[in-house]
Amino acid sequence: MSETDAVSRVDRTQEGAVAVLTVNNVKRRNAFSPEIRAELVGHLNDIETDDATRAIVITGAGGTFSAGGDLSTMQDMTAFEGRNRIRAGRQTVETMARGEKPIIAAVEGFAFGAGLSLALLADWIVVADDATFCASFGKVGLMGDMGLFWTLPQRVKAGKAKRMLMLADVVAADEALEIGLVEAIAPKGQALSAALKKAQAFAEAAPLPNRLTREALAHFPAGLDDMLAYESQGQGILFTSADTTEGLNAFFEKRKPVFQGN
Amino acid sequence: MSDAAPKTLVEDRGSVRILTINNVKQRNALTMDVKAVFGPALAEAKRDPNVRAIVITGAGGTFSAGGDVTLFGDMTPAKGRHVVYRQREFLHTMIRGETPIIAAVEGFAYGAGFGVAMAADHIVTAEDAKFCAAFNKIGLMPDGGLLYTLPQRVGMGRAKEMLMLASVTDGVEAKRLGMVDVLAPSGGALDAALAKAEKFAAAAPLAIGAIKGAFARWPFDLESVFAIEIDAQQALMGTADATEARRAFFAKQKPVFKGA
């Protein structure tokens, strides 16, 4: 514990085509400090142009995801210091929401406040059976941030979103699965391995269509004609890709396709 | 099923029109020649004032296996775009048209077939039916309007898994997730859909049309909702059907709507 006491960083490791980003600020339960934010964005930008990486897993060190913003760095903040902080948070949100690669969140322990916001920016979320979620902002006199007003209603219905945001309802794993806040539950301590397994499936899926799909869905909420335009333009390009040829050959030859991303 | 049989079968039961995609040899794949018949059949049903509800189903125990994979031989981006763009005609008719549409799904609703099912207002599925946005398996992205329709029904997290990993969802799971509205026993989807279609057909058609029109504009902000309500409600209040409904209400009778 003593060695990790002082660190406030995001570690990157690589498992084949999957990059694993671990928020590591254990002493403060992986509080989302400005340093963590900057390191996360740095890693995500590197990964964006790294062709060998097809999927990203985000998790937290020491058995918890993230307890939220770092209150210790919020003391005596002026209005403009606060504004700058939220603007930096915006960069994190945009990088995650607009990036082309699928993001999987592996949640153990707490995903509170900004930690909840961070998890919900992922495409697919797996949670340990004893993990809990809370938009705890109200407890310290704040409102939800880091895109929560955009991400939360995409996954849960308006009534529940309001209860979470206005009353800081704590949501346990089984309820989170039931209401569509997360996609899967793993036994305690196994969220990361479940996430890596799923990340492998994302990594093996054809990457080009998923880039276009992720980009189109990031325009949420979009109207019918916008979505029909995305699908016809994107599909037109994909029809002539080498991966579609491979996919069709594999289909007719009854084998598993191998997609190269071109 | 001979090749000469129409690619979409049309049958009326009272004021309910049944459109059956009929391309059994290719599991009702939405080939260009199927689309060439299915689209106009839908448009005609929509135009016909005697049709108060449309049921869409597939022949031979399956809904539709999706697009036509034999078409890709000499594809160019422009041709590909055109193939997908052509679907917009029937998707517009389904989503923007005034007539309520009920999908009756047996067997497979894959790819664009899944898209057709999700574009319906009300979806009845056999418990052993299977839904899959199979596109990614052949390097393609979802089409058939799924980027628009699916997140509305299952939320973004589940929609992304289905759309990006081409995961298969059976009828029972689909019902649990709210992806479909009614679960029927295997082989019973059409009967259940027809029973539900009767209810849609008996509802005030102008109001149904206005409601469909409002939903088709999703997403909208509050001001737009006010505008839609004011415009449509004002028109509906003056209709003969609204007068009939008031009369029937006070006479404790069932109203008979004429769509006027």
Image (spheres, coloured by chain):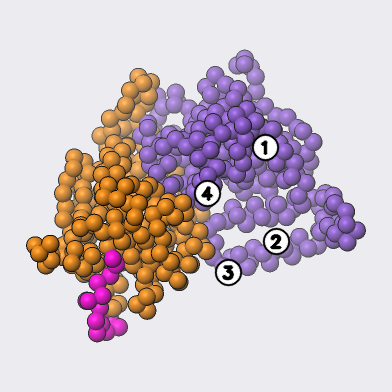
Mark 1 in CB contact with mark 2 (< 8 angstroms) = no
Chain the render paints orange: A
Chain the render paints purple: B
Element type at marker 1? Answer: helix
Residue B193: give its label: 1
Q: Position of residue A233 (x, y in %)?
A: 42, 43
Mark 4 in CB contact with mark 3 (< 8 angstroms) = no
| Chain bearing mark 2 | B
| Chain bearing mark 3 | B
Mark 2 in CB contact with mark 3 (< 8 angstroms) = no
Q: Position of residue A259 (x, y in %)?
A: 28, 33
Residue in the image at 33% along x and 57% along y: A131
Residue in the image at 58% along x and 23% along y: B23
* N-terminal-most mark, 1 or 2: 1
Q: CA distance from mark 4 to mark 3?
A: 24 Å
Task: Please tell me if label 1 and label 2 are on a single chain.
Answer: yes
From the viewer's perspective, tell me whether residue B34 is left or right of residue B17. left
Q: Judge by depth and name the residue closer to the eye, B182 or A203.
A: B182
How many residues crowd around disc 4 within 10 Å: few (fewer than 14), some, or many (20 or more)? some
Residue B223: give its label: 3
Indicate whether residue A2 is drawn in magenta: no
| Chain bearing mark 4 | B
Picture layout, residue A69 above or below residue B20: below
Q: CA distance from mark 3 to mark 1?
A: 35 Å
